[in-house]
Amino acid sequence: CALTDGTHFQSNGDILVAGRSLTVANKTDYVTLRFTNDGVLKGSRFFDHMSKFDIAQGVAVDPQGNVVVTGGSANGSRK
């Protein structure tokens, strides 16, 4: 299961999607997906910061072509 929180359309037609993926341990991890302009998945990356909730909130590409994902992590407790 995945939820989308950010999308970026590249000049070559690729589409980058960042969001969260629900794990079997009922946590969320960052997920970043790259699709071709006709919807074929070209690649995926996941990020787990050893917390309960990792949520990607935006995606962009810098001038050097690097994919940059922003978001947050929390362990579920408030102190």
Image (cartoon, rainbow, N blue to C red):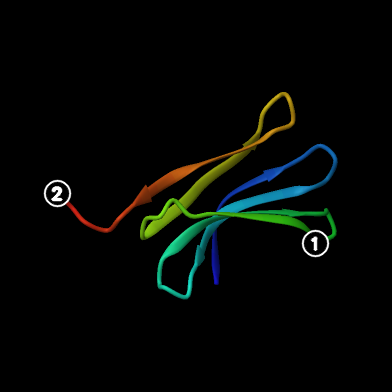
In this orientation, which residue lies closer to the viewer: 50 or 79? 50
Element type at mark 2: loop
**Callout 1 amino acid:** Gly
Position of the N terminus, as image quadrant, is bottom right
Cα separation, mark 2 vs mark 1, equals 43 Å
Q: Relative to 33, is 2 above or below? A: below
Write the residue at 69% across / 56% down: 44
User: Against 69, is 22 above or below?
Assistant: below
Judging by the rendered image, the residue that carries numbered circle 2 is: 79
* Residue in the picture at 38% in, 58% down: 53
Q: Amino acid at mark 2?
A: Lys
Binning the other alpha carbons within 10 Å of mark 1 as few (below 14), some (14 to 19) or many (20 upward) gives few
Quarter-of-image position of residue 35: bottom right
Who is closer to the viewer here, 74 or 62? 74
Q: Position of residue 37 (x, y in %)?
A: 83, 53
Q: Residue 14's x, y, as percent?
A: 79, 47
Q: Is residue 36 left or right of residue 23?
A: right
Q: Of marks 2 and 1, which one's residue comes earlier in the chain?
A: 1
Residue at the (83%, 45%) spot, across then down:
13
Residue position marked by numbered label 1 in the rendering: 39
Q: Residues within 10 Å of mark 2 (few under 14, many from 20)?
A: few
Furthest-left residue in this view: 79
Image marks 2 and 1: residues in contact by CB distance under 8 Å: no
Q: Is residue 11 left or right of residue 28?
A: right
Residue in the image at 50% along x and 49% along y: 56
Q: In front: mark 2 or mark 1?
A: 2
Q: Quadrant of residue 43?
A: bottom right
- Residue 10 placed where, x, y %? 76, 40
Q: Secondary structure at mark 1?
A: loop
